[in-house]
Image (spheres, grey):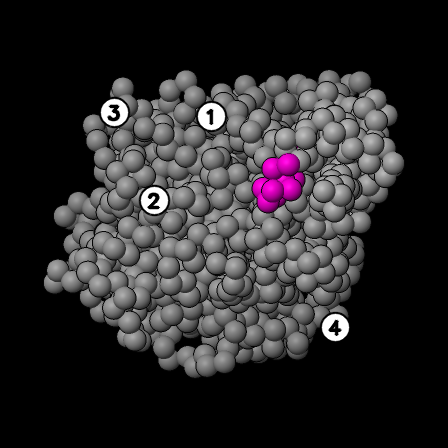
């Protein structure tokens, strides 16, 4: 199977070097080929396991709790102004 | 172009912010008016290792809406992740519902030209809102605020059953009325708490297949939706008739220019890679919970609209005006019940009261004349204590000076209904205006109003106008017999 | 060069020595710090918080002197895998993309350790984002095996296993997605427990594959591991997948036999690629179980062969999603190149910030979830996962626990497997199935090969079977006795 590595890299927002493109491309084809071996198992009518332990999602009461201070919220950011996170122009 | 040859196919996706205190998956405040990036916690910011926990109220509000719109409630719905990169989306995915939304099917009924139409719903699903990117003009960059990120939304998705801009406007208004009436949302459009995207395509009348559609984003007012849909229908028809093709794309409505503009085309490929969110388990709703929510549903605006006509005998128009908001309908019903006359109450609420409030830009909730005060006034009218004309004067005093109707009558006197007193006033007026009497008797019968007016003037408006009218006629007729 | 700790200290021992005044929390902490320094060449630590650890120890000693009640891990030096968030203490998941990230919150497991008065010595080395089986793929460089410094400690929780074996902490926390606690425990000759999915909170543990990740303890004895497990396990309202069941304590019957215990031996696990020494050692351990009264019976887990493919499809799909948040906006690495459009900012920041293996898995996972492939790969794998779970359900209808090798091999040389990812993935064949099934399993050292490298026995119990599993392991551990310098 041939993978459209450029399309996938674009979806994943990963810039690949020519070397990575080549290497990942062939490695992934091998891995995907190996994974395609699952076709050998009949799964008609088998429910997928979405979660290892089946139960209902717990529900939280609608109450306001603790917030991060503005300083703590932005402390790890690579670029901020006084109030906000800064990115190249998008709007 | 001949529009009659074409049919528009429209589907609407409406995002409604749910009226909760905290966010959908964390305890950060859902009220986000403050300084940017303060209504945030580690979950809101999508920090490493954080996990979502669902807000119960979010589920309940969606159930309310779904039940009210006749949807099937999925008692085991699921959350999925929808992937795309955008600076205001903290995790690189939005937690939404995909394969198993909380509500499926249902319908939105609305009134178009006095006729009730029903539009099928596809689904209503839960999701989290994104933050907000703001353009910083001066520095040619964007600033990101996550206060809004994680605020709970329902997305209400219609089937492509709408066929005109008028349908779109009516549908959007109906949905707005319902979410507000149910207390599901404040419906504040200026704050972006009620937002609409329209999918529009056109096809030759009679054609079965759908045309290529465009998605017009963020048409966030009733006026915009009408204009944007109309524009888009015309644009597409024009394009096809000129031999062109409609491109599947996202377009934005520019209200100033009155046009839609291409925003991005599907070639850029949005492959959202939905998959069930492993951090959240199925949202299980048991029968008891469903029943308890069902039991607390209020009457829907459209049902009320029908009842006002069927039981109270109002016109479709008046019933429509009165059911535009729950507050207005409640006010009206209180007055109608107290005064024992629905039509009178309707006339007063849609007429005198609303005219005055609109003139002053005052909300009904802040009206100086409360429902019980207006009820008292109308009671005096139906009892004949004051005339309709006096009631208007009295209303002005109530509205501007805050006096009660009873106090006003006590100070100004009630209506004169004593036949002897009225006859005395009529006789005085006839005696004082011999010239007009001659003209009247000579056939100028419209002078009747003159005599009635003089009597009303003499009694400073307090004489019962009906009685005055009758007595004036009688007395003038008697004069005719005499001569 | 060997760095295995010669004078092992147990949690019980540490608590008793403090209670008698023989030692103090500060002395224990200083000993751990000194040991970390002496074994620095193992590169087990991503960050040693010497000042912080001393301050915690002093506070505990003062509270003890004041007669205050202390928690069940008072004064016990513990290391935490760098995958797990520690408030105010840099947490990187061994990735350049989180190089300078300082969490403003503690993972639930960390706050529970703090409440238990444990001393958090620092952060432990690992494979980047827990993706790897050798601890060779780390921002901090490879960690090394204390039994042989030219060999890997296993992974991804390599630092967690190496530090415990080397004695620079008494116990540690690791995370296990497909074997990342059990396999390094096996390679380093320590005990490591992967709890039942949902038993230990994932809040604050940086996500790799959310439907598989579990935090668990590593220690030099079953009792130590059980003591840490007792502190970190239990319901957490911050994790929607957290189980509400009460946490049961293991029962260490002093002379208890294992009479009546049925031990299943999955035939599919004794395959060709297994090293003879590993097979011999595991067989011997099975013999010891029988001597204790247990009955070993062959069982079949017919879908074992499907497990690795299933795992790599599901884990990479979830990983590609979980790692989308690293975009260089709110935290983490941002490219220093001047970029004017947001797409370039993402693509370059992520390209610079993620290592080779992480990129490979993001790409595989993105592919698995992409339009047109979802049903064939992701959904298919979810269904095969059901078949694998059913294998275990069927087996546990007949036996109480399963016994298998933890890894087909002992610790390999650094650099030996780095180039072939698929070969590396296949080495997790014995640990992956129970991760997919969501049950609990542990590694118990059961011998050494001719080079003195540790061999591990994996014991697997049904979901929520931790107390039973730990009790059985403890009994077997006593029977196996001291071996290989442990």
The image's mark for residue B85 is: 2
In the rendered image, residues at marks 1 and 2 fall on the same chain: yes
Instruction: Examine the structure image and report whether residue B442 is included in the region drawn in magenta.
Output: yes
Residue C407 image point, x, y percent: 46, 60
The image's mark for residue C260 is: 4
Give the Cα separation between the discs numbered 2 and 4. Answer: 57 Å
Reading the image, the residue beneath label 1 is: B36
Q: Nearer the viewer, mark 3 or mark 2?
A: 3
Give the Cα separation between the discs numbered 1 and 3. Answer: 19 Å
Q: Nearer the viewer, mark 4 or mark 1?
A: 1
In this picture, residue C394 sits left or right of residue B99? right
Reading the image, the residue beneath label 3 is: B140
Count of marks placed on residues: 4
Mark 4 lies on a secondary structure that is: loop
- Mark 1 falls within which chain? B
- Report the magenta stretch's main SS: helix
Instruction: Examine the structure image and report whether residue B368 is included in the region drawn in magenta.
Output: no
Q: Quadrant of residue C150?
A: top left
Residue in view at x 44 percent, y 52 percent: B169
Q: In this orientation, which residue lies closer to the viewer: C184 or C234? A: C234
Q: Earlier in the sequence, mark 1 or mark 3?
A: 1
Mark 1 lies on a secondary structure that is: loop
Disc 4: CA contacts within 10 A as few (<14), some (14-19) or many (>=20): few
- Mark 3 falls within which chain? B
Q: Are marks 4 and 3 in contact (CB under 8 Å)?
A: no
Q: Nearer the viewer, mark 4 or mark 3?
A: 3
The image's mark for residue B97 is: none
**Region of the chain picked out in magenta, as a range:** B438-450
């Amino acid at each position: 199977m041939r993978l459209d590595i450029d399309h996938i890299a674009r979806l994943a927002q990963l810039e690949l070097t020519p070397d990575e493109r080549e290497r990942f491309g062939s490695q992934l084809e091998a891995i995907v080929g190996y994974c395609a071996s699952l076709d050998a198992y009949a799964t008609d009518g088998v429910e997928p396991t979405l979660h290892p332990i089946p139960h209902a999602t717990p529900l939280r009461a609608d109450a306001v709790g603790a917030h991060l201070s503005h300083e703590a919220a932005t402390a790890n950011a690579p670029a901020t102004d006084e109030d906000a996170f800064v990115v190249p122009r998008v709007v | 172009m001949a529009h009659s040859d074409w049919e528009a196919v429209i589907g609407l996706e409406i995002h409604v912010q749910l009226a909760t205190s905290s966010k959908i998956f964390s305890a950060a405040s859902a009220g986000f008016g403050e300084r940017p990036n303060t209504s945030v916690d580690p979950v809101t910011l999508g920090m490493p290792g954080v996990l979502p926990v669902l807000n119960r109220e979010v589920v309940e509000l969606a159930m309310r809406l779904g039940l009210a719109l006749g949807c099937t409630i999925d008692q085991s719905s699921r959350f999925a992740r929808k992937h795309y990169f955008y600076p205001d989306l903290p995790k690189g995915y939005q937690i939404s519902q995909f394969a198993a939304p909380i509500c499926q099917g249902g319908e939105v009924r609305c009134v178009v030209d006095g006729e009730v139409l029903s539009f099928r719903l596809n689904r209503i699903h839960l999701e989290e809102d994104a933050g907000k990117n703001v353009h910083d003009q001066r520095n040619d960059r964007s600033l990101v605020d996550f206060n809004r990120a994680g605020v709970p939304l329902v997305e209400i998705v219609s089937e492509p059953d709408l066929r005109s801009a008028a349908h779109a406007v009516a549908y959007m208004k109906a949905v707005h009325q319902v979410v507000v009436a149910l207390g599901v949302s404040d419906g504040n459009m200026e704050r972006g708490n009620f937002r609409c995207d329209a999918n529009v395509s056109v096809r030759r009348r009679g054609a079965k297949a759908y045309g290529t559609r465009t998605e017009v984003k963020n048409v966030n007012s009733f006026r915009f939706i009408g204009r944007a849909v109309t524009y888009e229908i015309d644009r597409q028809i024009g394009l096809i008739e000129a031999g062109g093709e409609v491109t599947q794309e996202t377009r934005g409505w520019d209200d100033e220019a009155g046009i839609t503009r291409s925003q991005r085309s599907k070639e850029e490929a949005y492959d959202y890679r939905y998959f069930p969110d492993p951090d959240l388990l199925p949202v299980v709703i048991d029968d008891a919970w469903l029943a308890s929510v069902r039991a607390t549903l209020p009457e829907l605006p459209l049902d009320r609209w029908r009842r006002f006509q069927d039981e109270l005998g109002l016109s479709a128009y008046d019933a429509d005006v009165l059911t535009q908001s729950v507050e207005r309908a409640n006010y009206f019903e209180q007055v109608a019940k107290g005064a024992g006359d629905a039509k009178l109450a309707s006339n007063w609420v849609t007429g005198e009261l609303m005219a005055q409030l609109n003139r002053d830009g005052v909300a009904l909730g802040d009206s100086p004349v409360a429902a019980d005060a207006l009820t008292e006034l109308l009671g005096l009218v139906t009892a004949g204590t004051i005339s309709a004309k006096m009631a208007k004067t009295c209303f002005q005093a109530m509205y501007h000076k805050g006096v009660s109707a009873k106090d006003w009558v006590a100070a100004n006197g009630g209506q004169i209904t004593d036949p002897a007193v009225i006859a005395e006033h009529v006789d005085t007026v006839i005696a004082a205006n011999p010239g007009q009497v001659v003209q009247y008797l000579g056939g100028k019968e419209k002078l009747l109003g003159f005599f009635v007016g003089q009597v009303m003037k003499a009694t400073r408006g307090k004489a019962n106008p009906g009685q005055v009218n009758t007595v004036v006629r009688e007395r003038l007729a008697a004069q005719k017999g005499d001569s | 060069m060997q760095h295995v700790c010669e004078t092992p200290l147990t949690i019980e021992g540490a608590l008793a020595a403090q209670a008698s005044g023989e030692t103090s929390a500060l002395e224990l902490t200083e000993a751990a710090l000194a040991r970390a320094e002496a074994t620095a060449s193992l590169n087990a630590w991503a960050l040693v918080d010497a000042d912080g650890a001393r301050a915690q120890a002093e506070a505990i000693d003062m509270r003890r002197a004041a007669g205050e009640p202390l928690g069940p891990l008072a004064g016990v030096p513990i290391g935490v895998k760098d995958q797990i968030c520690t408030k105010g203490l840099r947490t990187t998941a061994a990735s350049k993309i989180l190089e300078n990230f300082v969490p403003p919150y503690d993972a639930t497991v960390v706050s529970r350790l703090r409440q238990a008065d444990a001393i958090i010595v620092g952060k432990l080395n690992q494979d980047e984002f827990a993706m790897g089986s050798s601890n060779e793929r780390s921002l901090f460089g490879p960690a090394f095996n204390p039994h042989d410094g030219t060999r890997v400690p296993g992974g991804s929780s390599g630092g967690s296993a190496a530090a415990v074996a080397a004695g620079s902490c008494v116990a540690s926390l690791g995370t296990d997605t497909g074997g990342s606690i059990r396999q390094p425990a096996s390679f380093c000759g320590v005990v490591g427990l992967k709890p039942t999915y949902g038993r230990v909170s994932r809040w604050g543990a940086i996500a790799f594959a959310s439907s598989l990740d579990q935090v668990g303890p590593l220690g030099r004895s079953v009792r130590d591991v059980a003591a840490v497990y007792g502190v970190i396990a239990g319901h957490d309202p911050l994790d929607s997948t957290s189980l509400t069941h009460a946490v049961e304590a293991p029962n260490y019957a002093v002379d208890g036999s294992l009479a009546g215990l049925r031990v299943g031996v999955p035939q599919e696990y004794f395959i060709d690629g297994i090293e003879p020494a590993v097979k011999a050692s595991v067989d011997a351990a099975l013999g010891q179980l029988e001597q204790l009264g247990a009955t070993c019976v062959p069982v079949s887990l017919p879908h074992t062969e499907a497990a690795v493919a299933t795992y790599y499809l599901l884990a990479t799909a979830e990983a590609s999603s979980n790692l989308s948040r690293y975009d260089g906006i709110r935290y983490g690495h941002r490219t220093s190149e001047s970029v004017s459009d947001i797409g370039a900012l993402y693509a370059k920041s992520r390209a610079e910030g993620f290592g080779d293996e992480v990129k490979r898995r993001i790409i595989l996972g993105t592919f698995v979830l992409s339009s047109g492939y979802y049903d064939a790969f992701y959904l298919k794998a979810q269904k095969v996962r059901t078949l694998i779970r059913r294998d275990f359900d069927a087996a546990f209808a007949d036996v109480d626990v399963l016994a298998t090798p933890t890894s087909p091999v002992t610790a390999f040389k650094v650099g030996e497997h780095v180039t072939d990812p698929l070969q590396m993935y296949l080495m997790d064949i014995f640990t992956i199935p129970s991760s997919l099934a969501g049950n609990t399993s542990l590694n118990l050292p059961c011998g050494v090969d001719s080079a003195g490298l540790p061999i591990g026995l994996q014991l697997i119990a049904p979901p929520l079977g931790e107390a039973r599993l730990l009790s059985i392991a403890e009994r077997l551990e006593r029977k196996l006795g001291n071996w290989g310098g442990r």
